[in-house]
Amino acid sequence: MLGIIVILILAFYIIFFYPIRKPAEVKEAEEKEGRSEKYNNQMKKLWDVAQVSMKNRKPLRAEKALLTILKFDEKNAAAYNRLGILYAKEQNYDEAIECFEIAQSLDNNASSLHNVGLIYLETGAYEKAAMAFEQALELEEAVPARHIALSKAYEKMGQRKKAIESLENAYKLDHSTSTLRLILTIYEEAEDLEMIAETTARIEKKIADDNTRREAEALAKKNRSRRIVRKTTKIIYPKKREEKPKAIKKKPAPRRKLIQ
């Protein structure tokens, strides 16, 4: 009898008190999850403020939001990279370089190196710029803009041959007339008449090829449109059933009343 009473007491406790008094581990996990969700929401809001402020040209507000992000997450490479872009736009080149270098140390990526190279190029440190662009290309080679930036650094250093090689590498990737024009500019500055004529011929051929391709694409599109218009959908209507004439029912002859 005593055992039954103990079991009933335990059952009563489990049903009514245990769900209210959660174990410490469960409480800690739930509190941590709540803090994590709140933290993520705050970080998202700060990122939104930073992006909108940079877009609307409000650098002070953007800087404050990015610095707040870094206060909570000091190893956020993306925030350092964005802050470096902000400082570069404001021509605070020393701060921008520092931010890009920190971002690069946290996350080895080509974008940070490329950004550092652009600042070195802007400030006249052409050798450092070339080194940064070369390192960026080692990480990400299939980006024409990186080859073009490297060519500018080489050109500023007076290394025309290397500059042209970089532009030719860019042209292999983008097949752009503007890249050929950059090559032509270098030959014109060097007064290399033979290469000027050859590059001019390449540009003219590229323009003619592009026009031919565009005309062919336009004609193909026009023909496709005509085929769509000419194509008609035959609508098959169900055959109308012939109604058979209804049989006329003969009315029964009226019964004659018997005369009694």
Image (spheres, rainbow, N blue to C red):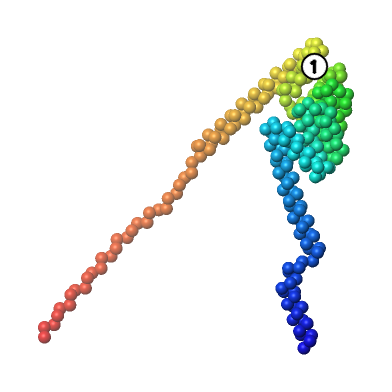
* Mark 1 neighbour density, 10 Å: few (under 14) some (14–19) many (20 or more): some
> Can residue 169 be seen?
no
Q: Nearer the viewer, residue 176 or 156?
A: 156
| Kind of residue indicated by mark 1 | Ile
Q: Nearer the viewer, residue 158 or 193?
A: 158
Q: Nearer the viewer, residue 28 or 149?
A: 28
Which quadrant holds residue 190? top right
Check the picture and name the quadrant holding the C terminus: bottom left
- Residue at image position (58%, 32%) is 221
Which quadrant holds residue 194? top right
Which quadrant holds residue 63? top right
Q: Residue 28: percent from the left, percent from the top? A: 80, 60
Q: Residue 197: percent from the left, percent from the top? A: 76, 13
Whether residue 85 is situated above or below residue 162 in the rendered picture? below
Please give left or right for residue 244 compared with residue 215 in the image. left
- Residue at image position (56%, 35%) is 224
- Residue at image position (59%, 29%) is 218
Whether residue 94 is situated above or below residue 252 in the rendered picture? above
Residue bearing mark 1: 186
Q: Is disc 1 placed on a helix, strand or loop? A: helix
- Residue at image position (74%, 81%) is 8
Q: Residue 164: percent from the left, percent from the top? A: 82, 21
Whether residue 130 is situated above or below residue 39 in the rendered picture? above
Q: Residue 14: percent from the left, percent from the top? A: 75, 74
Q: Nearer the viewer, residue 257 or 112?
A: 112
Name of the residue lying farthest toward the left: 259
Check the picture and name the quadrant holding the N terminus: bottom right
> Can residue 203 be seen?
yes
How many numbered discs? 1
